[in-house]
Amino acid sequence: MQSESVSQWLDPAHVRSLAEGLLVPNSQSNGLPNDQMFGSSFEGYAEPAGRDGAAFQMPRHSLSDAQSRAASSGILRGREQTTSPALTPEAPAERSEVKLAQPFETNKVQEATGSKELTGQMAPVRKEVISEPASPALPAAPAQKVEHGTEASVESSISQERSAEILASSPEDSSVQIEPARGTKPPKIERLQVGSALKPDPLLEAQPTVIDSPFKIASPLPKQGLAPSQAKSSVAERPVFRPLPLSTRLQAFGVWLKEQIPTRSYFICDRHGEIVVDEVGSEKLIKVARTLAHASSSAGRQVGEDKNLGSLHVKIGPDRVMEVVPRHSHFGLVVLGVIVQRPLSRDAVASVSRALGTALAEPSAPRQ
Amino acid sequence: MITLAITSQKGGVGKTTLAINLAHAFANSGKRTLLVDSDPQGSVGLSLTRQSRHLSGFYDMLGNPAVSTEKIIVPTRMPTLSLIASGHSSAYELGGGSMGVTLHRVRCFLAEVEALEYDVCIIDTAAGLFGATADVLSASNGVIVPQQAEPLGVRSVPKMLEALARMRVVNPELQVLGVVLTMVKEDLPESLESAAALRNLLPSEMVMNTVIPRDDLYVRASARGLPVGVMEEGAESLMTFESLRSELEQRIVPRTSETVNYAK
């Protein structure tokens, strides 16, 4: 009777199937969770090669890895293995002793925020409490730890660096590098400084004025001014400025991109998911790219690196990686996704990003 | 170190109660345990310390890399148990919420916790599998899902499973350790029926044998800012969470299959 009432609200077979999929280790699950979201070829998020920090390795440990490590160090014991209260771990006891020496040290962070000393609902930590396992135990001790301040600051600076690096792909050993086109050098282009009603994107303003790009932009006007009479007469003769349409510029960008990196396909979309160019044909991958780009953008803002969004990559097959290159433009955040065999190097990403920025840049009209 | 996230799609299912008392059970068994509150509401801190609003915590660490993990750890009178309060989450609430934004910081945080030689890190999360909660799950080893033994709780199961399936895309190593039936009221037929329905619905290995009863003692323990296991009349509850801890440890079975290293 109960099962009938449940089945009125949900599909028991579907629920059971979902649950069974969750119980199977991912390596044996025939890609069930992957299929549901990103398709069978999606394997998960790739990590930059060469990362060997603990922060990158840790989440990749399986639970069994963690358990075996814990078991080998005597951490995880079976229930039958009792722990003598007298032998409760040494480290905590040492920590208690430290507390005894400085029972009312306050957290530097708390001091900064003006908070009062933490008294807790219980007395300060005392060493003898260790032998009283059944006593009321939890409420906080008087202070958060402040020792190892130097080490902590070093660590925090390291983690700060890491946080700044997380969203930038920098596989040191990546074999994919941008190389100049054979025989021809990418044209050097000078951005024209022209008066325009359109205010340039401040992010673009910060870029160097001379950049490598596959695009040719109208040559600068002669610097010498024209006399009023000459100017009048030259109006009719002046060639009409026809900026290349965006589609043409992006097409040129695509040609350049494929010349520079061994990509199978790519797509460009805006932050709302509107497709500008799509050779990939996978809505799911585009969704992943947008998600990563947004995360990159948000995280970049947090660490003050909003301008340098870097890239992210996702492993989507045994020999396929989707490199995601977010780029701010006057259209807003534009997302380029490129399917490559290996993650691109940082330099390659920077070059691609610059070229994309140039393609997206508002064409400058000659000064009137 | 093993990182266990306590999470659910639905709110009010007993996540915080489970997290606090499970952490206490692990600590009571001699394991160095860190209880982390990643719920912006700060329920763990509010349950255990009067000063929780002033404590720097998890969200301070997420928002400011200069805040070290060591400085936000609050020791308790139980030497093997420490906690990290939620902290000040206003910056996160204003500017965050998207999955992935804090993932790197969460990973760094857990690496630092591991370096501090904790054996178990239990993270209480906010309801819903998005934002910082999703990032916590992306970096955790296992997830425990408390499920209210009420009809509405059972009906929310499909969404919870779908969300967990999505999380396992991001973190293929995330092990779903099981669903814990909470707030089981033995004198209420609907509660018992809901519990039975959930057991029928899900594979037996997904639902923990241990159930958490609805008991006034939890309210009294919360009022005193204590885990229920340390209450004078809490011996039975202590046994309940000891049983749950034991069951969890048995479920953390070493896998024989090779794990996929995507970095290669």
Image (cartoon, coloured by chain):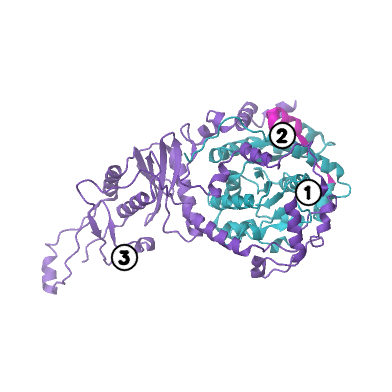
Say which chain tag 1 marks: A
Q: Which residues are magenta?
A: B195-216
Earlier in the chain: of badge 3 and badge 1, it is: 1
Say which of B61 and B52 sits in front.
Answer: B61
Question: Please, is residue B233 above or below residue A361 in the view?
Answer: above
Is residue A257 visible in this depiction of the protein?
yes
Say which of A175 and B188 sits in front.
Answer: A175
Can residue B211 be found in the magenta stretch?
Answer: yes
Q: Look at the numbered disc 2 and give the secondary structure of its residue.
A: helix
State the residue position of label 3: A197
Q: Look at the numbered disc 3 and give the secondary structure of its residue.
A: loop
How far is disc 1 from disc 2 in space, using C-alphas? 22 Å
The quadrant of the picture occupied by the N terminus of chain A is: top right
Q: Position of residue B92 (x, y in %)?
A: 58, 57
Question: Would residue A211 be found to the left or right of residue A79 on screen?
Answer: left
Q: Position of residue B236 (x, y in %)?
A: 86, 41
Say which chain tag 3 marks: A
Q: Residue flagged by tag 3: what amino acid is it?
A: Ala
Q: Look at the numbered disc 1 and give the secondary structure of its residue.
A: loop
Can residue A284 be found in the magenta stretch?
Answer: no
Q: Residue flagged by tag 2: what amino acid is it?
A: Gln
Is residue B65 visible in this depiction of the protein?
no
Residues indicated by labels 3 and 2 sit on the same polypeptide chain: no
State the residue position of label 2: B250
Q: Decide: few, some or many residues near mark 3? Use Cα within 10 Å; few <14, some 14-19, many ≥20.
A: few
Q: Colour of chain B?
A: cyan
Q: Decide: few, some or many residues near mark 2? Use Cα within 10 Å; few <14, some 14-19, many ≥20.
A: few
Write down the quadrant of residue A238 in the picture: bottom left
State the residue position of label 1: A88
Q: Decide: few, some or many residues near mark 1? Use Cα within 10 Å; few <14, some 14-19, many ≥20.
A: many
Q: Nearer the viewer, mark 3 or mark 2?
A: 2
